[in-house]
Image (tube, rainbow, N blue to C red):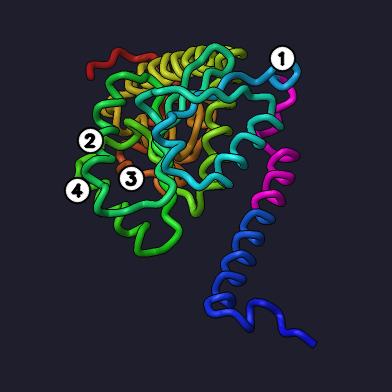
Amino acid sequence: MRSPPAMTRGGGGEGLRQHYLQNMHDRQLQVRQKYYSLNCPDAHCNDLNAKGSGVCMMSTAWKEEQHPSFIIFISSFLHTNSYRLNFLQIAPDFIFNNGGTSVAFLFITNWDCHDAPSVFSRVVTLKRQFRHLYVVVSAPTKEQNDSFNDSYFKHAMELGNPTFVPVCDPEMGFEKIVKIAHARGVCKQQDVISMMKLERMQSIEQMDCFLRVITTIPGIDNHDANALAGAVGSIEAISRASKEFILESTDLSVDKAERIFRFFRDPGYYLCPKIN
């Protein structure tokens, strides 16, 4: 019986091993692709799929630096989720146009501490050009993750400007990219950001009214009012709270707790003239 070529030819064993590992890697990409196509981007995915999710523009320079199997994975992944893929000479690694919103990404598929200065230099340049910029960094090992964290603070990056997204592997990183781009598109379509700003303004106005009412109590300042709001709650809840509960729940003094208690229960006290 003839022995397998890998055992009889010089160097054949290593070649067969590399071939086996590559097949395993390709198989993992196929399995992940099937999983992502069923679960990505999120619960709102069907809303945009019916109309075509959008366009993904990939940098040709970034593409040339990646393994062909990863580019095939990205292309198949985008196609499954109704994105059109274009290859262009662009400054970021990716630009997604989704729901009328453009989102730019830098995608570092394997963190190298020696490349940190050039990476953060690109970040500083691009954040001036793009309103929505994210930096996705794949750092599979603890050493790479620690190196990235050290470099981030060494280069004095402003928290959240732009947002950095550390991931464990490139496939996970691209999943995050699509989720972020999709979420931005959904927010644009549903005008969620405007609604959130409106709700925030209303919340601030309600808090201002709360502070104006509570600080009319003699000796109670903004700090005391904020402590009551956090520990007790609404004006109605404060009006029903006992002195003991106010003392246990806040850092207010006994005298202030007594004043609050009397203010809501003693007409002779809360109707008399007061000078703060």
Residue bearing the label numbered 3: 251
Q: Nearer the viewer, mark 2 or mark 3?
A: 2
- Which dot marks residue 154? 4
From what the image shows, is residue 229 above or below residue 50? below
Residue type marked 3: Asp
N-term-proximal mark, 4 vs 3: 4
N-term-proximal mark, 2 vs 3: 2
In which image quadrant can residue 214 be found?
top left
Q: Position of residue 152 (x, y in %)?
A: 27, 46
Tell me the magenta residue range. 29-47
Name the image quarter holding the N terminus. Answer: bottom right
> Could you say which is closer to the camera, residue 92 or residue 100?
92
Q: Position of residue 149 (x, y in %)?
A: 30, 52
From what the image shows, is residue 24 above or below residue 42? below
Q: Residue at x 69, y 55 (%)?
A: 27
Residue 268 visible in the shown view:
no
- Residue extending farthest to the bottom is 1
> Are circles 2 and 3 on residues that touch, CB within 8 Å?
no
Secondary structure found at label 3: loop
From what the image shows, is residue 87 above or below residue 188? below
Q: Rounded to the nearest whole Å, what is the CA distance between mark 4 and mark 3?
A: 39 Å
Q: Residue at x 39, y 37 (%)?
A: 135
Residue bearing the label numbered 2: 121
Residue type marked 4: Lys
> Are circles 1 and 3 on residues that touch, CB within 8 Å?
no
